[in-house]
Image (cartoon, helix red, strand yellow):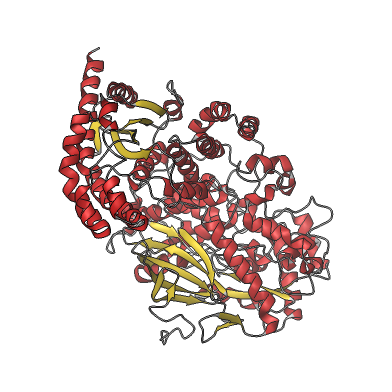
């Protein structure tokens, strides 16, 4: 029998392949998460089932079905997103990112198998304790930053960072959860539902414009999470802050520096305030940049401190922290000046909100009620219009000239209409760069087809595949589709390859291309000669290619071991495809050999490049 | 002499002529599977106890000394990469043991072997022997830096020389006493070589 509290859930002891359901862990609008037992490996796993109860229901044969035929398309699209997200997540092998072990389809829906983590989410912990001392906060934050850096380096952003999505394991180490399967996939045919967490979502997420989102979006969420841990409450919602700016020319949010004065170190408080800047341009632009503000290199605490003691005193902790000189290359922090820069942008935003209000009565209270929104625990839903193409007027909070023209527009800025591409979206800022094929080629792992560089990001590829579908041809007429992002792009801008990771061409790209050519012609020795110094220096793509070269050389010899090692090293830094290649090799190795390889990988990061590359004895005899 | 010794023995390990005559193919396949699994359990336990040692030597020193030691034991180097700290060597079984060492160690493992396969092949289990013919021994040595110097880890696997028969599993795990003896012999030779190198 199904759990009485979760009538749509699969019953206990229900078998999904070799997984046996034990109980429901939780249910959200988009699915149900179960605790299950992996009978093959005799371990517990968490299984997330795609079951958007708004549009689908469980039938007596346990299968999930859209409630009506009109829901078919949206159900299918959400299912596709769910699968894409699972496959994307499966690429990341990081201790502070939820580990996806498998994904499969059954019962006319899909299941994402994840490592089961025991502990509690940070929101629960904060509800119980109010605030956490600085050292414990830092101990939670830094590992999450590590994981986030990996995600960003792989061209994705999380977009839903909040205490509920940070899980603190029993050993105190944190793990970043919920990459938002199938979010944005529902709503009436002419609306797109954006889910944002009040207080934790930056202003640009309300626009729904993926082009304005990037690592700085996640940094806002993390900054807001820190604020919650410091002040004992979530920051005011970004919309409410924007209204405050409009009405009083000053931010109505009490700064972290004020809220945490005397209890936390000034550098940390300043870093949190920096992360919470309303305008994305005034925030740290990368995790690395923000980390420098937060953490002096020598004082990183261990993850075991993350959970900390319930009775720890915040004041005592802050005294131990030291300040680090600010990076002179970084623009000076703006402090309050963003307020003025934001005013004009808010005018545009207000116009957009007013437009939405007139268009969708009853659901347009974003502007009028959002001042209280931060009090809500649940995300708000903001319907916005999906439209055909229109000129782009992306609100630029730092550019009064641009935003002053916005109030005069009869329609909302297209950025307000553009649906978010995906919950995990590539972190793209420079569209021109993103569109450069050579940049894409340089990024794409060697195992990915060079003629289809977008395969570097399957989620992205799906988005870009959409224009060929009928719905993409008429984005305004059917259910929300990621392709509408393309349709809404400005003709005056370069093609918005919004889902493609952006990287500049690096100095070693030529070497990588030469190595790839050597691999293609079967000259693995030449490839190894080119790749080895790069791999030793930590170039992830070269490490993954070393794996390929070793695997290709195997031919009965035991290069599989070395291939496994190189794939693992590359996978640690998120090189796409490396984890999958490693996992494919794993069955060829003994468990003891895998332990040997893992030990090498574990120690690898502790070695200096010069040591690693000093290798006079190399290759087969 | 080693080859003539091998020539007198039938095919690899336990699946000798007697077994072949007394059990069906499926029973033999099941027996090999069981043997791999049974030996794997012992193998993993032994490696945890004996497979890793730490020496007060740099990784490069340990690497070179191990390569020399394994060469002294008759193993040929198949792969080596000091950058990642990996050395793979191989040789026809019973190397790195001598024939006599192999015979003694194998005898000690016969009761376990027979216990594992008897449910599948019945009485034929009493007639099987460990045979090194047709097998290679492959050893992976890995080297990582540690606080006390270098940590060296060994793994050992069997590799059948003959082409695989379709649907038949391959022997992969050495028997426990053979493993113990082999690891001890390698580390002893290594320690001797390392000491000599450090004296030089």
> Residue B20 appears at what percent x and percent y?
31, 50
Name the residue nearer the viewer: A132 or A617.
A617
Residue A168 in which image quadrant: bottom left
Name the residue nearer the viewer: A84 or B42.
B42
Q: Is residue B142 visible in this depiction of the protein? A: yes
**A328 to A97, vertically: above or below:** above
Residue A438 in which image quadrant: top right
> Residue A265 appears at what percent x and percent y?
40, 51
Q: Residue at x 55, y 30 (%)?
A: A531
Give left or right: position of B95 versus A130.
Answer: left
**A36 to B187, vertically: above or below:** below
> Residue A524 appears at what percent x and percent y?
56, 30
Name the residue nearer the viewer: B42 or A605.
B42
> Residue A401 appears at what percent x and percent y?
79, 55
Count the labels in the image.
0
Name the residue nearer the viewer: A442 or A298.
A442
Residue at the far front: name it: B21
Residue at the far top: name it: B200
Give left or right: position of A528 versus A457.
Answer: left
**A189 to B176, vertically: above or below:** below
The quadrant of the picture occupied by the C terminus of chain A is top left
Give left or right: position of B9 versus A22.
Answer: left
**A297 to A189, vertically: above or below:** above
Q: Is residue A185 visible in this depiction of the protein? A: no
The quadrant of the picture occupied by the N terminus of chain A is bottom left
Q: Residue at x 28, y 54 (%)?
A: B22
Residue A526 in which image quadrant: top right
Give left or right: position of A356 versus B21.
Answer: right
């Amino acid at each position: 029998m199904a759990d009485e509290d979760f009538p749509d859930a699969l019953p206990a002891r229900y078998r999904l392949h070799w997984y046996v359901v034990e109980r429901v862990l939780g249910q959200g609008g988009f699915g149900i998460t179960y605790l299950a037992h992996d009978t093959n490996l005799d371990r517990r796993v968490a299984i997330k089932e795609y079951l958007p109860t708004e549009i689908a229901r469980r039938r007596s044969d346990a299968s999930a079905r859209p409630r009506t035929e009109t829901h078919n398309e949206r159900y299918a699209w959400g299912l596709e997103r769910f699968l894409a997200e699972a496959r994307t997540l499966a690429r990341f092998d990081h201790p502070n990112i939820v580990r996806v072990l498998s994904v499969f389809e059954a019962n006319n829906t899909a299941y994402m198998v994840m490592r089961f983590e025991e502990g509690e989410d940070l929101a629960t912990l904060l509800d119980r304790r109010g605030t956490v001392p600085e050292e414990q906060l830092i101990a939670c934050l830094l590992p999450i930053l590590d994981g986030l850096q990996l995600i960003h380096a792989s061209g994705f952003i999380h977009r839903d960072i909040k205490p509920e999505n940070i899980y603190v394991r029993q050993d105190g180490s944190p793990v970043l959860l919920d990459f938002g399967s199938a979010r944005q996939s529902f709503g009436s045919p002419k609306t797109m539902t954006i889910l944002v967490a009040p207080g934790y979502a930056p202003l640009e997420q309300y626009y729904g414009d993926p082009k304005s989102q990037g690592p700085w979006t996640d940094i806002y969420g993390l900054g807001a999470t820190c604020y919650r841990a410091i002040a004992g409450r979530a920051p005011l919602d970004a919309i409410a802050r924007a209204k405050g700016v409009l009405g009083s020319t000053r931010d109505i949010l009490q700064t972290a520096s004020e809220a945490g004065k005397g209890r936390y170190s000034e550098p940390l408080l300043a870093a949190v305030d920096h992360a919470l800047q309303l305008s994305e341009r005034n925030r740290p632009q990368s995790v690395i940049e923000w980390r420098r503000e937060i953490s002096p290199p020598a004082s990183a605490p261990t993850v075991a401190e993350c959970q900390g003691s319930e009775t720890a005193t915040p004041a005592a902790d802050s005294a131990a922290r030291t300040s680090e000189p600010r990076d002179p290359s970084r623009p000076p922090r703006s402090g309050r000046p963003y307020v003025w820069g934001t005013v004009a942008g808010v005018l545009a935003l207000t116009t957009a909100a007013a437009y939405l209000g007139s268009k969708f009565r009853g659901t347009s209270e974003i502007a009028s009620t959002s001042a209280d929104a931060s009090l809500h625990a649940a995300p708000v839903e903001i319907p916005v219009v999906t439209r055909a193409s229109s000129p782009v007027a992306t609100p630029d909070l730092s550019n009064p000239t641009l935003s002053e023209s916005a109030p005069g527009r009869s329609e909302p800025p297209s950025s307000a209409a553009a649906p978010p591409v995906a919950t995990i979206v590539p972190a793209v800022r420079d569209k021109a760069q993103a569109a450069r094929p050579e940049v894409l080629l340089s990024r794409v792992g060697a195992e990915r087809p060079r003629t289809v560089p977008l395969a570097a990001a399957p989620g992205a590829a799906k988005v870009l595949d959409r224009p060929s579908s009928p719905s993409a041809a008429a984005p305004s007429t059917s259910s929300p589709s990621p392709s509408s992002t393309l349709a809404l792009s400005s003709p005056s801008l370069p093609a918005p390859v919004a889902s493609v990771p952006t990287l500049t061409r690096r100095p070693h790209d030529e070497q990588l291309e030469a190595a790839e050519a050597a691999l293609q012609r079967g000259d693995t020795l030449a490839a190894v000669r080119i790749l080895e110094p790069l791999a030793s220096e930590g170039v992830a793509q070269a490490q993954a290619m070393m794996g390929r070269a070793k695997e290709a050389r195997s031919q009965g010899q035991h290069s599989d071991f070395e291939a496994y090692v190189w794939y693992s090293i590359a996978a640690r830094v998120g090189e796409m495809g490396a984890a999958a290649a490693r996992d494919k090799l794993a069955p060829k190795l003994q468990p003891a050999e895998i332990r040997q390889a893992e030990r090498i990988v574990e120690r690898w990061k502790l070695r200096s490049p010069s040591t690693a590359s000093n290798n006079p004895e190399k290759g087969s005899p | 002499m080693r080859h003539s010794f091998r020539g007198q023995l039938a095919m690899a390990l336990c699946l000798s002529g007697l077994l072949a005559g007394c059990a069906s193919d499926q029973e033999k396949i099941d027996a090999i599977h069981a043997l791999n699994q049974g030996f794997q359990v012992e193998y993993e336990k032994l490696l945890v106890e004996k497979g890793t040692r730490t020496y007060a030597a740099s990784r490069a020193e340990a690497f070179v000394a191990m390569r020399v030691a394994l060469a002294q034991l008759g193993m040929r180097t198949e792969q080596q990469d000091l950058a990642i700290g990996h050395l793979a060597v191989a040789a026809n079984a019973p190397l790195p043991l001598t024939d006599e060492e192999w015979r003694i160690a194998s005898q000690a493992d016969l009761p376990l072997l027979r216990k594992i396969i008897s449910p599948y092949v019945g009485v034929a289990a009493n007639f099987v022997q460990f045979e090194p013919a047709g097998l290679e021994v492959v050893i992976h040595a890995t080297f990582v830096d540690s606080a006390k110097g270098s940590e060296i880890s060994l793994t050992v696997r069997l590799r059948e020389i003959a082409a695989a028969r379709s649907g038949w599993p391959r022997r992969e795990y050495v028997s426990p006493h053979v493993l113990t003896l082999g690891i001890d012999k390698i580390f002893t030779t290594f320690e001797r070589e390392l000491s000599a190198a450090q004296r030089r």
